[in-house]
Amino acid sequence: MRALLFTLPAALALSACVEVDMTLEVLGDDQARVTGYMQMQRQMYDMSGGDDSFCDADDGGTLVLTETHARCEFDKTGSFDEIMQPEGESDSPAEMQGELVSLGDGRVRALLPLSGMTDDMAEVEEDPQMMAMMRQMMAGMSISFTIKGREIESSTGTISADGTSANITLGIDDLFAPADERPGDFETIVRY
């Protein structure tokens, strides 16, 4: 695992009941920091054999186990290439996918391809029993992404009142919405 997750495939999120809260802070022309956590039910973690790839210490992860959850807390700073993995080139479901592109003049374009996440829902939608089970298991869980910097110029997400961050949060209803109603990609222009 070369980098931490930013676009978690929906099928993995659903099958593992993973909750995600990640923040990507643009620090400079080619420098970013990712902080946050991924967590799943402890029972699911144990059933998977306690796979170390869920939380790799070499990638800034710290595994925290409780009676109810397995949680990977992370904090990683690096170049854009060290933080992001181009869409379709991930060799692990726990890698960040998307792109960070310097636009010059202290601006960066951050793109997180959420459409790829929700495209994985077709297989789940074909099985009504699986849909019902997934809805029950995911009740109350969410997948949240935040982009931070000195100033948000524009975003397809919700811009904070102070204008320094943009956020998108996906709940179970967003993931299971009809294909034409699911969220599009999360794109933000941020000044550092």
Image (tube, rainbow, N blue to C red):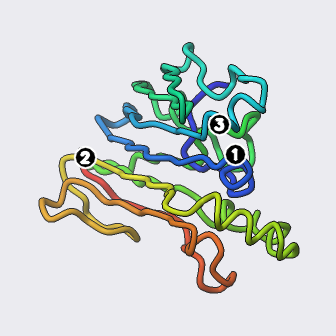
Foreground disc of the pair 2, 1: 1
**Left or right of 135 on screen, residue 161:** left
> Residue 16, labelled with which disc?
1
Q: Mark 1 falls on what kind of element?
A: helix
- Residue wearing tag 2: 149
Return the x and y of residue 188 as percentages of the image width and height.
Answer: 38, 60
Quote the CA–CA distance across marks 3 and 2.
24 Å
Q: Name the residue tied to disc 3.
A: 94
Say which residue appears at 77% left-offset and 32% top-offset: 47
Snapshot quadrant of residue 59: top right
**Residue drawn at point x = 45 percent, y = 27 percent:** 74
**Type of amino acid at the residue the image marks with label 3:** Ala
Distance CA(mark 2)–CA(mark 1): 31 Å
**115 vs 19, nearest the viewer:** 19
Q: Nearer the viewer, mark 3 or mark 2?
A: 3
Question: Helix or strand or loop: what does disc 3 sit on?
Answer: loop
Q: Are marks 1 and 3 in contact (CB under 8 Å)?
A: no
Left or right of residue 140, residue 137 in this image? right
Tag count in the figure? 3
Dot label at residue 171: none
Q: Given the current orientation, which residue lies at the most extreme top position?
A: 58
Q: Answer few, some or many: residues within 10 Å of disc 1's Cα (few below 14, many 20 plus, some between 14 and 19).
A: many
Give the camera-side residue of 125 and 92.
Answer: 125
User: Which x, y percent locates residue 90?
Assistant: 72, 39
Position in image of residue 155 (x %, y %): 35, 67
